[in-house]
Amino acid sequence: MAKEKYKYLPVTEDSNEINLREILDKYKRFWPWFVIVTSIFLAVAVFYIKKAPNQYTSVASIIINDEKGNSTSRTSNGFDVDLLSGGLSSNSMANELGLLRSKRLMFNTVKALDLNVQYFNDGDLVPRPLYDASPIKVEILQLDEEKLSEAIRNENNILKVKYLGEDGLQLLNETEETVINTSFNSHIKLSFVDFVIKSNVEDTSDVANWKEVTIKFLPLKSVAAAYNKKLEVDLIDDNATLITLKLTDGVAKRSEDILNQLIFEYNKEAIEDKNLIAKNTADFIDERLSIINSELDSVESGKESFKELNRLTDIGAESSMMIQNISEYNKQQQQVATQLEVTGSMLNYLESGSNDLLPANLGLESETNGFVTNYNDLILKRDKLLAGSTNKNPLVVSLNEQIDQLRSNVKQSLLNQRQNLMIQKESLRKRTGSIGSQIARMPGQERQVRGIERQQSIKESLYLFLLQKREENTLELSVTGPKAKIVDSASSSGGSISLALKLF
């Protein structure tokens, strides 16, 4: 029987290892194919590296102004409360970071920069984003978000714009194969948007240097959500208020503009919050001024009528010595009465059940004023969260609990202050009793006049006090500054492709 021939891989005499040289000799004849395939892959890689869009990282830094000071106390629920401003120092920076990362703030930024309209240059093999380098600019007059979403599903949200000369433009929808001939500044109406196209260059003829420009319409919310995911907001140090903002995008100028506009929107909201508190306080003061003014007119009219009826003239000259003895006590009574009036008004405002902002800076005790300021801060933060979430949001629930606690603290503090004032009032009443024998010798008419004048003095004092507070509130409203101080405006650094690879 003939031996079957088997082909074995050659082995060396000294070992059973495979002889690589003989294996390579078998495939030597295919080396041209290896060279061709390798060259193709290398060419594709080089093409991708040269044509793929770069990614630029922009960085900005800000300092949050510390308006709450360093004097803090601790409430019964364990929070650090600033006695001067009522701020929660333990959570303030975390709240500011949350605001900078909020979807609402990015939405306002995208809307302000019109980033829902994107521009591309079709002159290159790979479309390149143009942003502010686009020779044309779209101004949206009206946009229907629902119809735009439908147009995106049908790929009808993209138009190619070609310059025809003499301000003439041609719009091409490749999906529907429709052409619109128009011109600069003319009203263009599509199913989902009304807009006009304006020149973005000084000389309109420069648009002719561009072969075509592609414009793409996108929903504001989706663009804002995309950039919100790219945004990085970090606190440099737990003991500092320095924050860095970082954003990566295919256009360096666009990422810089987004960060700068985001900081602007943040400062804008902070100023609006301060103005809202100041306006609420102004409304409260104006309401109290109207009431006090009416009461003051009534007291003055009563005094005048009483003097005319009893034919009284210069009672002050007749009892100047007695007034000198009790003037100091009356002055103290006026101060106590003013504080009691303000405290009572605040308690009535609280007991009305309103969940609005509380009036601030009315000259209450520092602890009470601190609670009021802190309460207003929490109301503003909760309302901002509710704008993008529901009452079931854990942050909203936590804020509501803090608001209820602080509202109770404000009320209790006001009650304590009123109790103290009542004690002071009673003490002053007893002191004035020591000179009751002198007052008893005064004619009954004079005593009645003094009572009227005392009421008049209290009302005048409260009226002047409220006028002063209104001026202070107006001044605070007029000098409101930005909350975030810019340390470094947004600036960008190189693309994502290395210089070494770019040299191919």
Image (tube, rainbow, N blue to C red):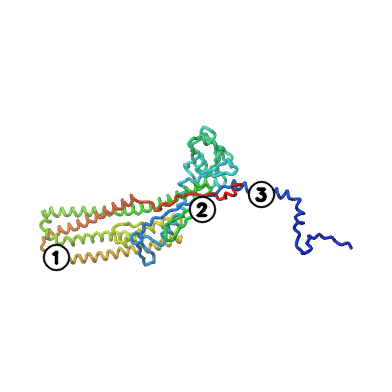
Pick whichever of labels 2 and 3 is earlier in the sequence.
Answer: 3
- Please tell me which of labels 1 and 3 falls first in the chain: 3
Q: Quadrant of the N terminus?
A: bottom right
Decide if residue 481 is in sight here: yes
Residue 149 horizontal side relative to residue 105, left or right: right
At a point 18% along the width and 58% down the height, the residue shown is 454
Q: CA distance from mark 2 to mark 3?
A: 32 Å
Relative to 213, say whether 449 is above or below: below
Q: Which residue is mark 1?
A: 435
Q: Which of the numbered marks, if any, corresponds to residue 12? A: none
Q: Amino acid at mark 1?
A: Ile
The quarter of the displayed image where residue 209 is located: top right
Q: Return the residue nearer the eye: 105 or 13.
A: 13
Q: Give me the disc on residue 41.
A: 3
Amino acid identity at mark 3 = Phe
Q: CA distance from mark 1 to mark 2?
A: 78 Å
The secondary structure type at the circle numbered 1 is loop
Which residue is the site of mark 2? Answer: 230
> Could you tell me residue 187's position as x and y percent?
48, 37
Amino acid identity at mark 2: Lys
| Disc 1 versus disc 3: nearer the observer | 3
Nearer to me, 392 or 48: 48
